[in-house]
Amino acid sequence: MYKTIEKGLKAATTGPEVLALLIQKSQRVSEAAVRKLMNELAALKLNKEPGENVDTFGDKCLEVA
């Protein structure tokens, strides 16, 4: 992550500019993580569980989260 931030820096980058780049990069990573989590949770289906067992389905949801 730091190498990609360094690439965006100019020779005379100020502290606030560095902070803005760090926040921007962090938000992108967070967005991707949330999107991946949502897709994984959406892929879980109760009717795919043997006997539609709610307990095992709940456990799988917790594992993903």
Image (spheres, grey):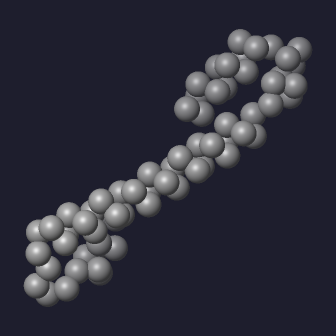
| Image coords of residue 38 (percent x, y) | 63, 43
As drawn, is 59 to the left or to the right of 1? Answer: right
Q: Residue at x 11, y 75 (%)?
A: 14
Looking at the rendering, which quadrant does residue 57 occupy?
A: top right
Looking at the rendering, which quadrant does residue 64 occupy?
A: top right
Quadrant holding the N terminus: bottom left
Q: Residue at x 49, y 54 (%)?
A: 31
| Image coords of residue 41 (percent x, y) | 67, 37
- Figure check: 26 above or below 17: above
- Figure check: 41 above or below 52: below
As drawn, is 7 to the left or to the right of 42? Answer: left
Q: Residue at x 19, y 85 (%)?
A: 10
Q: Residue at x 85, y 17 (%)?
A: 52
Comparing 55 with 20, the one in front is 20
Looking at the rendering, which quadrant does residue 43 occupy?
A: top right
- Figure check: 20 above or below 6: above
As drawn, is 60 to the left or to the right of 10? Answer: right
| Image coords of residue 17 (percent x, y) | 19, 72
Comparing 31 with 51, the one in front is 31
